[in-house]
């Protein structure tokens, strides 16, 4: 009989523990507990325009550092294996699965998360459109959908519906609200009047 | 239908801002001071006896704070279920993924490392995956008492429904059609992985859960851990989907609580995506054998179903196979056996009994219509249900309108062709449709509304919002009944210390149950305000409603018909859904914006179930092969068709402003509609879900 190793049940990476004073997200944590054997590095990383110098374990992924060290829990861990896209952030402007990037790779680079979309208290047009056109159902994939859409509009301000689908196809929505997400992105791009239908 | 002020108007979600700014706090986003991280060790065998577990090396690892196995934890999960006994940790283990041990450590990496240090000596046992095989003499016994799972009375019998006399019905037929269908195990695959955080303060337990129903979760945690209900608090502020597998409490809630107790510190237990796929539950796989008797004019005389549902090794769902109830027919017999197997556990996934059953019966009814040279829509109009089980009148029924107006919006007569498979290809087009119904229950729920001196209304309801927009729906209903703008409603949800009982978001019941309670509380409060005026200073006026409405002598159902057009590439087997119309009678639609999203989502999920989703098992090893989003092939942006939604708003005298149920009907006929469209395109029928490319090429060969 072939075996699956126990390890395969734990493919996901984890994160170092950080403790905060209150049970809410987004608090600046105290330094992480140290696992003696794990090699560590110090990285410099700009997140949503703010520079950070952080000591990390080399095995930590970018999403672990964002969520557990910087308190930015907008990026979600849906699969931790590069399949679902809930952890999508912009790395030097390009959308990446932050679960599949080691934090050390982000050294001296710039990251934008969903928390960095709104500027000076004003929502990004994508966020406005996601509200108006009911993009999020459960909302767990929404941050990732927004970041993929943002990357698309940055280089293609007026995409067609099929271009939106292609750009966002790495972002799974199990509520399957795909129609609404496409509609939202087209609305934000000011091209909703263009048919949302597929090419026949 | 009369127009209302708040209800019936498209309204963005009241919590939408949080959902688009990353500030909605899901359970996994929470951290408690001193919190430990927990992981679970699972069986790599589909069936095995554990000879010995050695945790000493794990225990010796620095940072490990608590370890649970069967030897120090005999908590029974679902202890109120008389059908079988499921411990948190079982011996023998009965499926690949059954929990063997759980541990908590100072960080995730340490917890993972420690889990790998636990040594388990397994004695592999024979296993069985197929529910029909599992009932054969000599099959390995998975649970004491045999593999036919018992009912609540302990009887090891199939679930049987009969009306008329099936033999008589088959004799009365001019023609009898006979066929069989199968459906696969599919995981719910909600985006938010399972997570639970447990914290003890003295003898009082708080569980930050990811649950569809805080009230049931609360009751069951207290029962399974033998705690007084007031010693347990369940909180769930935002949750990332469930589709039926986050009802009640789960083993991970209980494990987190027991680990936290042993460690003397709060514990967060997280599942990996793979664990989520194999260790919780998905939709039960089925085998369905039908006989249908019909007169030459298309009148049904008999419908018979013998079905088998693979429940995995522990009973959690009904195992039902539904669909035939949407037909009018004098002689009906349905016998469904819920069977233990060594596959992943099966239980609720959006419309638990329905889409697979509707796929079976609607495939066969389609064949009957073609054989009689009848238009499938006409055939259904002729034979659709008029009374529930031909006996009980419906409170309202919009099924005929769903069929007629849906067909019209879809341009059925233009898209469907009477000769299936006609056309030269290689890409062929075809149209299909199917119908369904779903129980729109009324029942027990509660609501509390306070009004303060500023005229703000604080509506306390025990709902979590799993993506259905339940919070917004409750707020709209409150605003409507109170006669105030939506902005005057402050909703309090998702905390058993602050909210009264709600049935939870299962069975598509929140709107009809809890919405009704909100109306009654609002009526009471209005009366109090009329008598006393608004309160002064810090005082509040409070109204509480505990409601349990019934519908005497009538059946209350939602109805639905879906229409799909597909393109099938006969050289590659690839299917593309090019047009889709969903016609729904859910009574009055409370919020057309979010309700339409529900339909679009449910229909799209059904397309995935029809075409590619499956948790595939290796028959030689009993191990799951496709546990993950890529492997199980859930729908993506590129797969999703544009779904057009048509509301058939029947007037219904019951429920909140006449609203009927919605969330689950959205998936019910979708699988069958796509399957029937494929048949119309290629003239060959695939009878086993999912209808993958290889199967299409197989029937075309």
Image: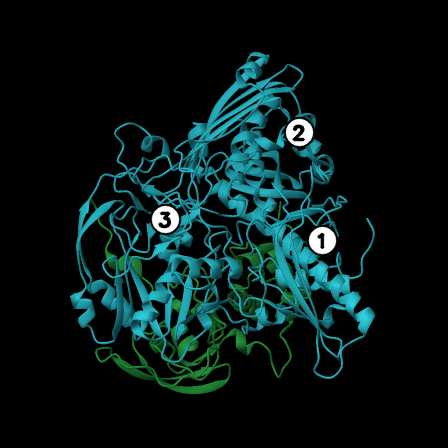
The numbered mark 2 sits on a residue in which chain? B
Residue at 57% in and 76% down: A117
Residue B671 lies in quadrant: top right
Q: Chain A is which colour?
A: green
Residue at 21% in and 42% down: B125
Percent position of residue B579, x then y: 63, 43
Residue to which mark 1 is pinned: B656
Q: Chain B is which colour?
A: cyan
Q: For the residues tagged 2 and 3, is the chain the same?
A: yes
Relative vertical location of residue B438 with respect to residue A166 in this rendering, above or below = above
Residue to which mark 3 is pinned: B626
Q: In this view, does B592 lie to the left or right of A52?
A: right
> Counting residues from the N terminus, which is met first, the one under dot 1 or under dot 2?
2
Does dot 3 land on a helix, a strand or a loop? loop
Residue to which mark 2 is pinned: B391
Residue B361 vs residue A187, the one in the foreground:
B361
The numbered mark 3 sits on a residue in which chain? B
Residue at 30% in and 52% down: B98
Query: What's the distance in space between the residues labelled 1 and 2, CA to CA?
Result: 26 Å
Residue A36 vs residue B224, the one in the foreground:
B224
Quadrant of the frame with the C terminus of chain B: top left
> Counting residues from the N terminus, which is met first, the one under dot 2 or under dot 3?
2
Q: In this view, does B298 lie to the left or right of B239?
A: right
Q: How crowded is mark 2: few (under 14 residues within 10 Å), some or many (20 or more)?
A: few
């Amino acid at each position: 009989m072939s075996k699956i190793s126990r390890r395969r049940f734990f493919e996901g990476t984890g994160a170092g523990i950080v403790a905060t004073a209150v049970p809410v997200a987004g608090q600046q944590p105290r330094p992480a507990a140290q696992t003696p054997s794990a090699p560590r590095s110090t990285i410099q990383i700009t997140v949503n325009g703010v520079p950070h110098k952080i000591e990390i374990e080399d095995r930590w992924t970018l999403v672990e550092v964002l969520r557990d060290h910087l308190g930015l829990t907008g990026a979600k861990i849906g699969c931790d294996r590069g399949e679902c896209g809930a952890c999508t952030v912009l790395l030097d402007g390009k959308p990446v699965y932050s679960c599949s990037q080691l934090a050390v790779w982000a050294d001296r680079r710039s990251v934008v998360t969903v928390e960095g979309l709104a500027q000076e208290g004003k929502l990004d047009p994508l966020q406005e459109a996601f509200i108006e056109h009911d993009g999020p159902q459960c909302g767990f994939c929404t941050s990732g959908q927004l970041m993929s859409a943002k990357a698309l509009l940055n280089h293609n301000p007026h995409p067609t519906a099929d271009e939106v689908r292609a750009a966002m196809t790495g972002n799974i929505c199990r509520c399957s609200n795909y129609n609404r997400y496409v509609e939202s992105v087209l609305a934000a791009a000011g091209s909703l009047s263009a048919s949302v239908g597929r090419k026949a | 239908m009369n127009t209302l002020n708040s209800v019936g108007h498209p309204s963005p979600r009241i919590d939408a801002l949080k959902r688009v700014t990353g500030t909605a706090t899901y359970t996994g986003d929470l951290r408690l001071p001193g919190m430990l991280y927990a992981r679970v060790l699972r069986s790599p065998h589909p069936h095995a006896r554990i000879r010995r577990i050695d945790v000493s090396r794990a225990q010796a690892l620095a940072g490990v704070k608590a370890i649970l196995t069967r030897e120090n934890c005999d908590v029974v999960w679902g202890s109120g279920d008389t059908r079988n006994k499921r411990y948190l940790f079982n011996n023998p283990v009965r499926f690949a993924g059954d929990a063997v041990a759980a541990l908590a450590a100072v960080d995730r990496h340490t917890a993972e490392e420690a889990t790998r240090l636990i040594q388990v000596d397994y004695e592999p046992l024979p296993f069985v995956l197929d529910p029909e095989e599992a009932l054969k003499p000599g099959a390995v016994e998975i649970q004491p008492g045999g593999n036919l799972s018992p009912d609540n009375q302990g009887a090891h019998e199939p679930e049987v429904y009969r009306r008329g006399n099936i033999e008589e019905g088959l004799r009365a037929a001019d023609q009898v059609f006979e066929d069989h269908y199968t459906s696969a195990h599919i995981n719910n695959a909600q985006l938010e992985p399972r997570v639970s955080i447990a914290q003890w303060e003295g003898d009082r337990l708080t569980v930050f859960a990811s649950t569809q129903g805080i009230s049931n979760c609360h009751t069951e945690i207290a029962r399974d851990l033998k705690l007084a209900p007031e010693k347990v608090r369940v909180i769930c502020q935002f949750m990332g989907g469930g589709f039926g597998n986050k009802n009640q409490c789960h083993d991970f809630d209980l494990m987190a609580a027991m680990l936290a107790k042993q460690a003397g510190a709060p514990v967060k237990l997280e599942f990996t995506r793979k664990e989520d796929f194999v260790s919780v539950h998905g939709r039960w796989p089925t085998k369905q054998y039908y006989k249908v008797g019909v007169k030459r004019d298309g009148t049904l005389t008999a419908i018979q179903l013998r079905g088998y549902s693979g429940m995995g090794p522990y009973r959690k769902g009904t195992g039902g196979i539904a669909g035939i109830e949407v037909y009018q027919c004098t002689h009906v017999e349905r016998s469904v056996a819920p069977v233990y197997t060594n596959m992943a556990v099966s239980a609720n996934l959006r419309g638990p009994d329905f889409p697979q059953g509707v796929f079976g019966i609607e495939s066969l009814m389609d064949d009957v219509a073609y054989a009689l040279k009848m238009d499938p829509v006409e055939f259904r109009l002729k034979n659709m249900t008029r009374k529930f089980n031909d006996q009980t009148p419906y409170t309202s029924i919009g099924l005929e309108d769903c069929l007629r107006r849906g067909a019209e919006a879809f341009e059925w007569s233009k898209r469907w062709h009477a000769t299936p498979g006609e056309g030269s290809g290689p890409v062929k087009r075809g149209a299909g449709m199917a119908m369904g119904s779903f129980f729109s229950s009324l029942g027990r729920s509660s609501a509390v509304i306070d009004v303060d001196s500023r005229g703000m209304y604080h509506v306390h309801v025990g709902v979590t919002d799993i993506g259905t927009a339940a919070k917004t729906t409750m707020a709209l209903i409150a605003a409507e009944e109170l006669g105030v703008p939506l902005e005057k409603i402050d909703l309090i949800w998702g905390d058993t210390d602050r909210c009264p009982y709600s049935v939870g978001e299962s069975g598509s019941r929140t709107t009809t149950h809890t919405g009704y309670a909100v109306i009654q509380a609002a009526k009471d409060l209005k009366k109090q305000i009329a008598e006393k005026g608004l309160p002064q200073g810090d005082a509040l006026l409070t109204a509480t409603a505990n409601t349990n409405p019934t519908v005497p002598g009538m059946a209350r159902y939602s109805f639905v018909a879906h229409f799909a057009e597909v393109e099938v590439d006969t050289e590659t087997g690839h299917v593309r859904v090019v047009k889709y119309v969903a016609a729904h009678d859910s009574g009055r639609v409370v919020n057309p914006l979010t309700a339409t999203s529900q339909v679009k989502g449910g229909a799209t999920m059904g397309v995935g179930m029809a075409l590619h989703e499956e948790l595939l098992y290796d028959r030689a090893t009993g191990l799951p092969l496709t546990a993950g989003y890529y492997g199980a092939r859930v729908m993506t942006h590129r797969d999703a068709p544009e779904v057009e939604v048509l509301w058939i708003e029947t007037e219904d005298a019951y429920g909140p402003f006449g609203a009927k149920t919605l969330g689950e009907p959205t998936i019910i006929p979708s699988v069958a509609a796509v399957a029937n469209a494929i048949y119309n395109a290629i003239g060959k029928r695939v009878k086993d879900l999912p209808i993958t490319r290889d199967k299409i090429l197989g029937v075309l060969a």
